[in-house]
Image (cartoon, grey):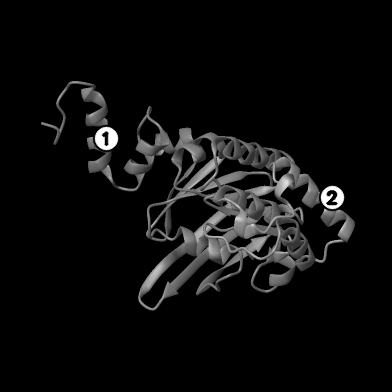
Amino acid sequence: MISIKGLTKKYDSVTAVDGLDLEIPRGELFGFLGPNGAGKTTTIKLLVGLLKPTSGSIHIDGMDLFKNPLEVKKIIGYIPDRPFLYDKLTGWEYLEFVAGLYSMEINVAHDRAEKFLNFFDLDGFADELIEGYSHGMKQKLIISGALIHNPTVLVVDEPLVGLDPKGARQVKQLFQDLCAGGTTIFLSTHSLGVAENMCHRVGIIQKGRIVAMGTVDQLRSQAKQEHGDLEEVFLKLTGDSDFASLLDSLRSTGPGKEGPGLK
């Protein structure tokens, strides 16, 4: 469903994405991890057509993103980490506006808007201005807008920011259900627990290149670490072995024992 080949993006002398190759099949929830400045945000902006690459290609459902941008964007949903909303619209008006951008039939748009407003417990606030929404409510509205046109590919950057435990659980279940129905999700997050619990595969990017990719068990194998959570594997694979060793040491000391730097 997503095919990325030789994707490169340079800013003057800085190479943000360096020859990225990636294949993501239909229905997969793919986690995209990396330290700050690794190239995650640039990759996402390239994937949704907000940036043009220096070289390389992206195909979505067999279509070249940069040769057929409008056709590809019709089947993509995008949830950015810092979304923009029109505060003087109501929640209902915002969803109508987004549906209009995709030229959706009004009856279909209303049915889907109502479905998401009910799912996220926003139906009681649908006629209130967005400026009065909490951060979590705004995040739910953004997710609803990204899904209203029933995209086949969903690109997500930190989807759970600002959500309470119930909202986070709703989103996790929604994403898993979407993938089960054939939607492909490309999810970038700093929450390693989210990636470990939700994603079918995980790719780790560092300095613009994929340094490891696979299931969590496969990543443990690549890190030569049979046990431990994804956090420890991530630290080892990204070369932060000193911090990983310190983390192990602190955990092994236990309560009441001395560890490095704790005397």
* Residue occupied by mark 1: 247
Q: Can residue 49 be seen in this snapshot?
A: yes
- Among the 4 quarters of the image, the one containing residue 106: bottom right
Image side of residue 111 versus residue 239, left or right: right
- The kind of residue on which mark 2 rests is Asp
**Farthest bottom residue in view:** 12
* Residue 144 spot, x, y in % from top left: 69, 51
In the rendered image, which quarter contains the C terminus?
Answer: top left
* Residue 24 spot, x, y in % from top left: 61, 50
* Residue occupied by mark 2: 111
Q: Earlier in the sequence, mark 2 or mark 1?
A: 2
* Residue 94 spot, x, y in % from top left: 71, 61
- Among the 4 quarters of the image, the one containing residue 73: bottom right
Q: Residue at x 86, y 54 (%)?
A: 108
Image side of residue 240 versus residue 263, left or right: right
* Residue 248 spot, x, y in % from top left: 26, 31
**Farthest left residue in view:** 263
